Amino acid sequence: MLSVHGLSAGYGRARVLFGVDLDVADNSVTCVMGRNGVGKSTLLNTITGLITATSGQVTFDGTDITRRPAHARVRAGIGYVPQGHESFAPLTVAENLDVAWEAAGRGPRTLVDGALELFPRLVPLMGRHAGVLSGGQAQQLAIARALVTNPRLLILDEPTEGIQPSIVAEIEEAIATLHARGIAVLLVEQYLDVALRLADTVTVLDAGAVVHSAAREDLSTEQVQSLLAI
Ligand SMILES: Nc1ncnc2c1ncn2[C@@H]1O[C@H](COP(=O)(O)OP(=O)(O)OP(=O)(O)O)[C@@H](O)[C@H]1O
Ligand SMILES: [Mg+2]
């Protein structure tokens, strides 16, 4: 479904990614892991078009999207929840969902109902401003905003970062449910246990390059721990 080949990117003269190869198969969960600052968010931002690749290729369903603008990638079916769960603070929860739904080209209205079914905690908050939500509520809203764009591939950058444990469990369950519904997932996840329960494939980045990639069943927790301790 998603194929990343030889991808390099950076900020001005600072190079961050060095020839990253990554594949996300249909209906699979790929988890990207790595220590702070190795380039995980830069990779996701380059895949989604927020950063321009300096070389390499991003292919989605066989189409080269490397030079396409971010909004075209959303319309092609790539939903993105960036790190830090930001929404439009002055808008209400309902307005945030509407803006995302409209921007993606107004798919069926049932997309909004579906997102709220997945995150029922948002239902009583629909009239509240996004800026006053708790971290966990804001993360659920950020994921719901990506879902109303009707993604076939959902990309999530540390969706459990700074979130209380009960909500972490809800977010894990929501990702598992989306996977069961046939959505492919590319996930950056800091909690090893959550990542290893969800992942079909684990890719470890270090210093902007892939240092290991394997099917989940071929990796022990200890192996992943030692790869992350590089
Ligand atoms: N906007 C930016 N301008 C310049 N350098 C940046 C920018 N964003 C990130 N960097 C640098 O790029 C490198 C990779 O950062 P990135 O955010 O991709 O790492 P990460 O693996 O997502 O880290 P974390 O686990 O902390 O989220 C770091 O050295 C970081 O300082
Ligand atoms: Mg990051």
Image (tube, grey):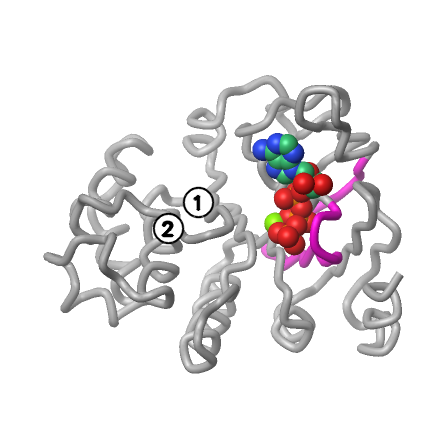
Compared with 10, 149 (above or below) is below
Query: Is 30 part of what is drawn in magenta?
Result: yes
Q: Distance between the residues labelled 2 and 1?
A: 6 Å
Q: Horizontal and vertical percent for residue 4?
A: 72, 35
Residue type indicated by callout 1: Pro
Q: Horizontal and vertical percent for residue 89?
A: 25, 46
Dot 1: few (<14), some (14–19), or many (≥20) neighbours within 10 Å? many
Residue type indicated by callout 2: Leu
Residue at image x 62%, y 22%?
A: 52
Q: Indicate yes or no: mark 1 CB to ligand 2 under 8 Å.
A: no
Identify which residue, 46 or 200, lies in the foreground: 46
Residue at image x 79%, y 50%?
A: 205
Q: Horizontal and vertical percent for residue 111?
A: 27, 50
Instruction: Tell me: 149 left or right of 72.
Output: left
Identify which residue, 179 or 8, lies in the foreground: 8
**Residue bearing mark 1:** 151
Residue at image x 62%, y 25%?
A: 63
